[in-house]
Amino acid sequence: MNLQRSLPWLIAAVALAGALGLFLGQKWLGGDAAPATTSAIVYPQPRILADFQLERADTGEPLTLDDWRGQWSLAFIGFTHCPDACPQTLAQYREIERLWPQERGPVPTLYFVSVDPERDTPQALVEYSRYFSPDIVPARGSHEQLEQFTRQLNLFYVQTPLSNEPGDYTVDHTTYLVVINPQGRLAGFFRSPLVPAEIVDDLVALGAG
């Protein structure tokens, strides 16, 4: 078995298992109470999250669960060397900002959390995220911190070598856009392909803004 070739399939399997469990939960645990959405996968009951500590790349200040309380937030894991999913998702967030109805108030903040602490310096993360939107909050942490953070959000990442050269690797990761409610709980997520107009409509339906 070629482990390197199997890693993307492992990520897909983990994501599928999580989505299947959520679907069954919606059917069997009163999912009809959740707002009707087009693209969002919404948990029947928002999931309580344990506190975590990362570092904001733009300010150097800690990023904790308290920062997610009091407003709707979005979270996405990735890395600045990402060839496709990361730039696509951050560009789609820029479109979400453009489409957001002004009467709903501020757009939910997107937290872009790097899962490549070896290469993603604070400066690199700030420059990368600012290219797409000045309102994206870039964050980073050690692998130990990231493991705690990603696991409770049902996210997964792993470094995959591209050659025998040191530092020549990519990072396979879940591409969910995670939704956090004002209580700091995991409300649901969006799966690729992301459609900005549908995301806006679903976030409004959930009460964001």
Image: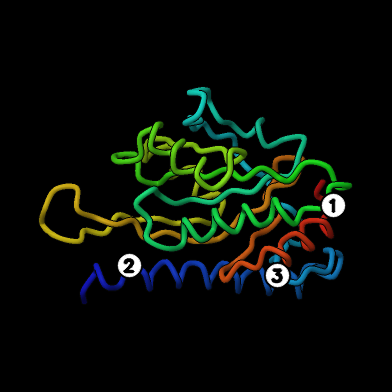
Report how many numbered discs are placed on residues in the image: 3
Compared to residue 207, the image places residue 183 above or below, namely above
**Secondary structure category for the residue under label 3:** loop
Tell me which numbered mark, 2 or 1, is placed earlier along the sequence: 2
Q: Distance between the residues labelled 3 and 1?
A: 15 Å
Tell me which numbered mark, 3 or 1, is placed earlier along the sequence: 3
Instruction: Name the foreground residue: 51 vs 81.
Output: 81
Residue 45's x, y, as percent? 76, 56
Q: How crowded is mark 3: few (under 14 residues within 10 Å), some or many (20 or more)?
A: many
Instruction: Name the foreground residue: 94 vs 37.
Output: 94
Q: Nearer the viewer, mark 2 or mark 1?
A: 1
Tell me which numbered mark, 2 or 3, is placed earlier along the sequence: 2
Q: Residues within 10 Å of mark 2 (few under 14, many from 20)?
A: some
Amino acid at dot 3: Ser
**Secondary structure category for the residue under label 1:** loop
Residue highlighted by disc 3: 39
Q: Distance between the residues labelled 2 and 1?
A: 37 Å
Residue 79's x, y, as percent? 40, 49
At 57% from the left and 71% from the top, the residue drawn is 193
Compared to residue 37, the image places residue 138 above or below, namely above
Residue highlighted by disc 1: 207
Can you say which quadrant of the picture contains the N terminus? bottom left
Amino acid at dot 1: Gly
Residue highlighted by disc 2: 7
Left/right of residue 10 with respect to residue 24 in the rendered view: left
Q: How far apart are marks 2 and 3 (CA)?
A: 26 Å
